[in-house]
Image: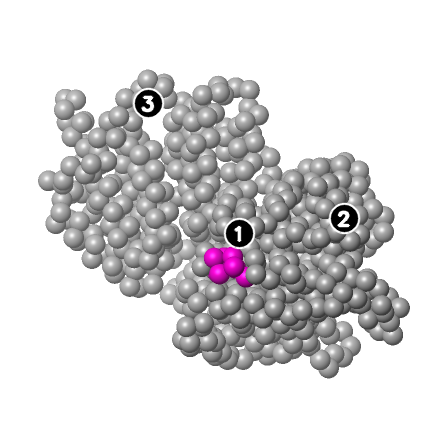
Amino acid sequence: MSMLWVDKYRPKELSALDYHIQQAEELKNLVEHSDFPHLLVYGPSGAGKKTRIMCILKELFGPGVERLKMEPITVTTPSNKKVEIMTVNSNYHIEINPSDVGIYDRVVVMDLIKNIAQTQQIGMTGNQRDFKVVLLTEVDNLTKDAQHALRRTMEKYSANCRLILCATSLSPVIPAIQSRCLPIRVAAPSVSEIATILQSTCEKEDLELRPELAEQIATAVNGNLRRALLICEVYKMEHGDLSEQVGEPLPIPEPDWKVFVVQTASLITSEQSIENLMAVRERLYELLSNGIPPEIVLKELLTALLMKCDKHIIPQVLREAALYEYRMTQGNKHIVHLEAFVTKFMCLYQRHLKSLMQGF
Amino acid sequence: MHSFLKSGKLGEAGSSNSPTSGSAKKRLKKLQWVEKYRPKTVEDVVEQKDVVAVLKECISGADLPNMLFYGPPGTGKTSTILAAAHQLFGDLYKDRILELNASDERGIQVIRDKIKTFSQLTVCSARADGNPCPALKIIILDEADAMTQAAQAALRRTMEKETKTTRFCLLCNYVSRIIEPLTSRCTKFRFKPLNQSFILERLQAICKQEKVLVAENILNVLVQESGGDMRRAITALQSCANLQGKNSHITLENVYEVLTVVPEKWVANFLDLCRKRTDIKQIIQFINELEQQAYPTHKIFEQLNVLLIESDTISEPLKAEIGEYLAESSFRSTCSRADFTHLLDFAVHTQEILTVDPEARKWEQQENAKCTIIQGLV
């Protein structure tokens, strides 16, 4: 069976984890304890949050958690609108991403989770726990309303159900929820850790990976282990051999959209005019319509622009970026704020160029 | 609604001699410590003297006012009213209390139907065993600041009309979010953040009972970092104990990790970076590394704030200026997932404030202000 390496070699047990070993031991202690708290797992993407969660679940309930099925569930909002949400569940746990339904996430949290939480687990045998686990992903995307709805649910039904929350950033999670969970920080693996994992994965595949290449990939991925494994696999597909240097040292391919953003940045600095702004708009639309989250677009655009502009205007550019980024979270139309930022940048940039000209 | 009011969290207190006591005890073992060590009587509530005095009076027979409890989380608002209710009503608890919180639907419709019907019921002034008990019902509205304005407004008249049979108790973190007409109908009690010595005392008692091994100084750190929030302190203690497993000491790292404290070194480095004229690329790299460590941004800002205020080398006016930026960046970062932008913004600005001559900065600001009116691209 052909599987991606990422999935094929994903550790299935806490003892099999490759890094944060101390933490893994502590988690094992936690699972063995009769009293299991709510968890809040956070860390950058590709650091292994989900892997750890699945390991914990397996330790808790045994191999039964790996038999998953998808099931759509319909909930009715107070205004009688029906919204459907996908859930992934096993006999022991259910995984939901409430932010899928946008502003109706509160209803999902209130109805669905409460329903699950109220039903008691029956027919326990042997090592089985008498609670179910609700796994909520992307909690940092939940509206404040939904988060408030969650807080008392967590306390009240702790006899029947435990929540495992998963987030990339902790700051949008309200303090009330944070104080009810045990935070588990999953930091990104270091460069050497990634390199070691790449080596061991290749060994399992009966391939030889030259250390420089491993190092090169590990440095390029910014702590994202998933991407590292994917790149490594792509390399193997393209070149067939990882042990010998084939011609020139090959550059690590950047994702297409990143290249696209950098090109957009140079377009912005090349000319500041209304026509150019229109061209930028089209490019921004293309990025958004391809599903790149707007905050990522802004971040990458900002980084690319900062590399190109004079240090005198950097503070001002950043101030504006932070402002538009904030507004973007408040509003619904992201493109407006992205464009406003681009326009603002053009203004600042052009004015700075002019003042330089006058200096001569 | 009544049926799931209490899922056994405090019910054990009264049911010790009932036939189900065996199973109750079994469940008690698995309770979270926060629930297990919730004060059972009003006298057990620490620190909040005013409200305890009033409630004591009520338990001994005086009339109960409508109440509004407000204060930061973990100061005992819910605990106090639940303890009082148990003392007042004992076994009748389930019939006499309606507890609604933000996880229940609390729109205007619920106020009209559920609360109104509940409050219109008359109750008897004696318990089943003949003991007297106040002829009252209490409606507890937890997290009242999350109620809509309309729902709050709908409460006004209900509150007055049913005073004969019903008392309201509103619990919230921010009293400013409760509309004026409601606050004026209630006796307000402010719950102060708990004194650290009280928390320490309580934690020590728990440690003794649960046989947790922890050094005195580590317990002190835990109390300090929890900032007057009893729930946070107890949860943290339990988490540490669970993570460590039986028979091993809780370490300082455990406490820091559980309370999501950012190691001193990162925060100090952050500020150091801002003090020098570091290149933007270096700052970006530093913040990227910080992000990969996944420390929560709001915590970074919080600790930077403390570090700034305590710093001897930065002059007061500059501190004020940085503080303003810090407040704004910190607020913005709680709204969005893009912590990077806000951290970078703050870093660069702090750097400017600390390294550039104030006169030059003023001039630059004026220049930049001119650009806020978009001058039209040519």
| Residue contact between numbered discs 1 and 3, judged by CB atoms under 8 Å | no
Which residue is label 3 attached to?
A: B361
Identify residue for label 2. Answer: B57
What is the secondary structure assignment of the residue under circle 1?
helix
Residue B376 falls in image quadrant? top left
Q: Earlier in the sequence, mark 1 or mark 3?
A: 1
Quadrant, the C terminus of chain A: top left
Q: Which mark is residue B182?
A: 1
Residue occupying image coordinates x 60% and y 62%: B162
Tell me which amino acid carries mark 2. Answer: Glu
Q: CA distance from mark 1 to mark 2?
A: 23 Å
Q: Nearer the viewer, residue A1 or A175?
A: A175
Locate residue A220 relative to residue A12 in the image: left or right: left
Which amino acid does the dot numbered 3 rest on? Arg
- Few, some or many C-alpha atoms within 10 Å of disc 1 (few <14, some 14-19, many ≥20)? some
The front one of B272 and A239 is B272
